Amino acid sequence: MAIVNGKCPQCGAVTKVNETKETAFCTQCGDQINVQQSIYLLKAAERARPDHAQAGQTNHTRTTTSQRRENRERAAEKQVMEAETRQKVSDWLQMCSTEQDFLMLRKRILDMALSEREKGMLLSVLDEMTKQRLKDTLKKAADYKSSLESPVTGIIGAIVIAAIGLAINYFFSMKWPGIVCMILAVLALIGFISDHFDKKGMEENKKAAELIEEYRKQGYKL
């Protein structure tokens, strides 16, 4: 990746561009620009500057304006790198045809001859995109973990709701609140029991939990 400075032909601002690409977007006005044209324009502008202006750029005492320009250039360079990193990971994900291919992406990145910073950016984006891709699987895994909890907890909850209904009915002679609580208790108990005896659903959730565990063993932060 070769990130260099260029000059936007639309607004005249200095912007970061990738000289290996044909086009880019100006970080100031957002217009699409030709990369080689922008590089040529910036070099032409630098050649047209007076000698004293070029010498002033090498002065160690920087003005507030130059510092702000540097900050904008750094931010623009970071935006370019993040966009290219996201596109690169997206391309890798699209080339995966099996779950094993997805699992091995993290190891492939770690084995690449890249700087720690570049690896860190790639891994961070990979974790984010993998989490989004496995959104439904993560939910099923969470449901499976919840289903493994002791059934006593669900039964006690239903009993508590029923007890509240009976107490309201007994102490306040209010039938409707008591009936509503009893109905809620029965529905909660039925739902709890049906979840525990749904073998097909339980099996799907178990497989989802096992898959998520495998991803975490590979180092994915999900």
Image (tube, rainbow, N blue to C red):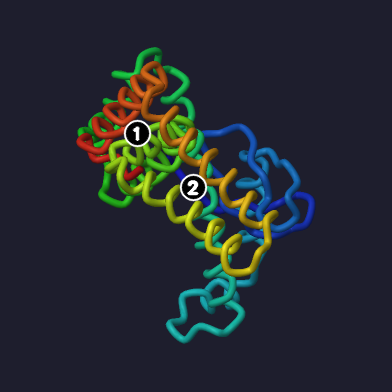
Percent x, y of residue 202: 36, 24
Q: Earlier in the sequence, mark 1 or mark 2?
A: 2
Residue name at image x 36 percent, y 14 percent: 98
Secondary structure, mark 2, is helix
> In which quarter of the view is residue 166 placed?
bottom right
Which of 90/187 is in front? 187
Q: Secondary structure at mark 1?
A: helix
Question: Where does the C terminus fall, quadrant-wise?
Answer: top left
Q: Is residue 195 above or below residue 156?
A: above
Answer yes or no: is residue 103 visible: yes
41 sits left or right of 115 in the view: right
Mark 1 = which residue?
Answer: 144
* Quadrant showing the N terminus: top left
Say whether residue 210 is left or right of residue 70: left
Residue tagged by mark 2? 82
> Would residue 171 appear left or right of 122 to someone viewing this image?
right
> Can residue 130 be seen in the rendering of this structure?
no
Question: 155 left or right of 57?
Answer: left
Q: Quadrant of residue 178?
A: bottom right
Q: Nearer the viewer, mark 1 or mark 2?
A: 1
Q: Amino acid at mark 2?
A: Glu
Tell me if mark 2 has few (under 14), some (14-19) or many (20+) residues whose alpha carbon lies within 10 angstroms of its own.
some
